[in-house]
Image: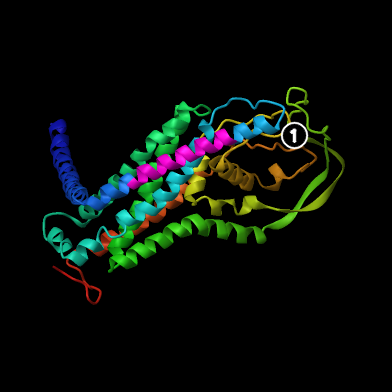
């Protein structure tokens, strides 16, 4: 008897959930059909594919030119590691940059564009709930933006085929890029539901994205000015190297390239670990810090292997998190490594803050879509 009662309670709930999801799917299908009918969307997708391919080819040509220059003006042949790492880094940075530019354009007028066209009221008088309309518009904008990411996937795979990268790097990079595009689309849809004019919502969405990218850097830079302090350290004695010789004759010391000696004294230092969290919301930091790069080893000159732009961003975030205790030469009398391993990742904090912001905007947008509306902005079109 109790099992029948449980089934009676769960059946209506399951039916309501299926009906709610069906309403979201209807809005998604309607939105995608409207986008697929537009010729401009295909033109943008083709331009995206051509530009990404051009960047990939230029990166490959640059790598070959650098290698030939090393062979011509040096007495050794550089190790053949392949251009894969360089291609992956450049293409990933390029795709993330243009994804942050395209996603607001695909989402920031999703709601108020229909309101201006008089079609939003038609959806609101149906059995669709405000949440279904909002989620449907979000998933449709996200799907349209992911098409650009799919178009750039072959060029990231080129990085694996050219050597120096693993399939895991591409999988993690694509996953984090998809999440970041989804966050930007959620911000754009939320602002679109709150703003009355499409142009205003597009501008505000771009400003929000600029705040995530540049505002986090500015706030971190200003925060370091308030994080001055001291650290106990002694003097670093750097090793001296012979003049340039062929690589096979050059000694290969291990990192670090210095030893610590002398009494420990207080020295001025910037405690970046106190304000490192300000970098967390930066989309580049989130993507770069999530990619599992291998720990670099020392080469024949006692320096770490070259890293690309994205890996440099990851190392910069780790340096900021480590602070002077983990990066200052001879802090506490210990030599510090040049390349930092990922002990405590920063990207979960940044992604959590981004999701919190996107969720808040979607919730406010849901409140603005509820009917009957108590108050409307002047000049708002109803139908």
Instruction: Give x and y (percent) for residue 306.
Output: 62, 36
Q: Is residue 192 visible?
A: yes
At x 47%, y 49%, the residue is 283
63 in magenta? yes
The residue positioned 70% from the left and 26% from the top of the image is 76
Residue, disc 1:
256
| Secondary structure mostly seen in the magenta stretch | helix
Mark 1 is surrounded, within 10 Å at the Cα level, by few (under 14), some (14 to 19) or many (20 or more) other residues, namely: some
Residue in the foreground of this view, choosing between 100 and 130 = 100
x, y percent for residue 221: 61, 58
Q: In this rendering, would 21 be left or right of 351?
A: left
Which SS class for mark 1?
A: loop
Q: Quadrant of residue 171?
A: top left
User: Which of the image's four quarters has the C terminus?
Assistant: bottom left
Q: Position of residue 56 (x, y in %)?
A: 46, 38
Name of the residue lying farthest toward the front: 72
Query: 230 or 105: which is nearer to us?
Result: 105
Q: Is residue 18 magenta?
A: no
Q: Is residue 235 left or right of residue 289?
A: right
Q: Residue at x 31, y 42 (%)?
A: 147
Is 164 drawn above or below residue 41 in the view shown? above
Magenta stretch? 47-65
Where is residue 92? Give x, y as percent. Answer: 46, 41
Question: What colour scheme governs how the chains and residues are painted in the rendered image of this protein?
Answer: rainbow
Quadrant of the drawing holding the N terminus? top left
Name the residue: 38% across, 34% down: 154
View extreme (top): residue: 248
Judge whether 108 appears above or below 264 on screen: below
Q: Visible in this render: residue 345? A: no
């Amino acid at each position: 008897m109790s099992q029948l009662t449980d089934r009676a309670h769960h059946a209506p709930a399951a039916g309501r959930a299926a009906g709610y999801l069906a309403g979201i799917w209807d809005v998604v299908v309607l939105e995608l059909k409207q986008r697929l009918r537009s010729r401009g969307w295909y033109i943008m997708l083709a331009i995206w594919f051509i530009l990404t391919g051009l960047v990939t080819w230029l990166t490959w040509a640059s790598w070959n030119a650098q290698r030939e220059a090393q062979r011509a003006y040096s007495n050794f042949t550089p190790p053949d590691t392949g251009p894969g790492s360089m291609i992956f880094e450049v293409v990933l940075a390029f795709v993330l940059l243009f994804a942050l530019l395209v996603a607001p354009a695909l989402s920031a007028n999703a709601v108020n564009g229909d309101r201006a066209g008089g079609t939003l009221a038609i959806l609101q008088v149906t059995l669709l709930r405000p949440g279904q309309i909002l989620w449907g518009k979000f998933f449709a904008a996200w799907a349209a933006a992911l098409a650009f990411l799919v178009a750039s996937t072959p060029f990231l795979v080129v990085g694996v085929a050219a050597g120096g990268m693993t399939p895991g790097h591409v999988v993690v990079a694509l996953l984090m890029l998809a999440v970041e595009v989804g966050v930007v689309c959620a911000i754009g849809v939320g602002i679109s539901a709150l703003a009355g004019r499409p142009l205003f919502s597009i501008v505000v969405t771009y400003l929000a994205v600029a705040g995530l990218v540049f505002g986090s850097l500015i706030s971190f830079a200003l925060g370091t000015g308030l994080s001055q302090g001291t650290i106990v350290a002694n003097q670093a004695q750097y090793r001296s190297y012979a003049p340039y010789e062929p690589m096979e004759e050059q000694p290969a010391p291990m990192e670090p390239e210095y030893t610590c000696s002398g009494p420990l004294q207080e020295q001025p230092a910037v405690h970046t670990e106190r304000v490192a969290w300000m970098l967390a919301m930066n989309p580049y930091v989130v993507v770069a810090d999530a990619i599992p790069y291998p720990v670099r080893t020392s080469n024949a000159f006692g320096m770490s292997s070259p890293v690309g732009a994205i890996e440099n961003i990851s190392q910069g975030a780790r340096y900021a998190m480590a602070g002077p205790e983990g990066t200052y030469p001879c802090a506490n009398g210990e030599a510090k490594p040049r390349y930092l391993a990922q002990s405590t990742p920063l990207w979960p904090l940044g992604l959590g803050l981004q999701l919190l912001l996107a969720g808040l905007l979607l919730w406010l947008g849901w409140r603005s879509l509820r009917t009957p509306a108590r108050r409307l902005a002047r000049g708002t079109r109803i139908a």
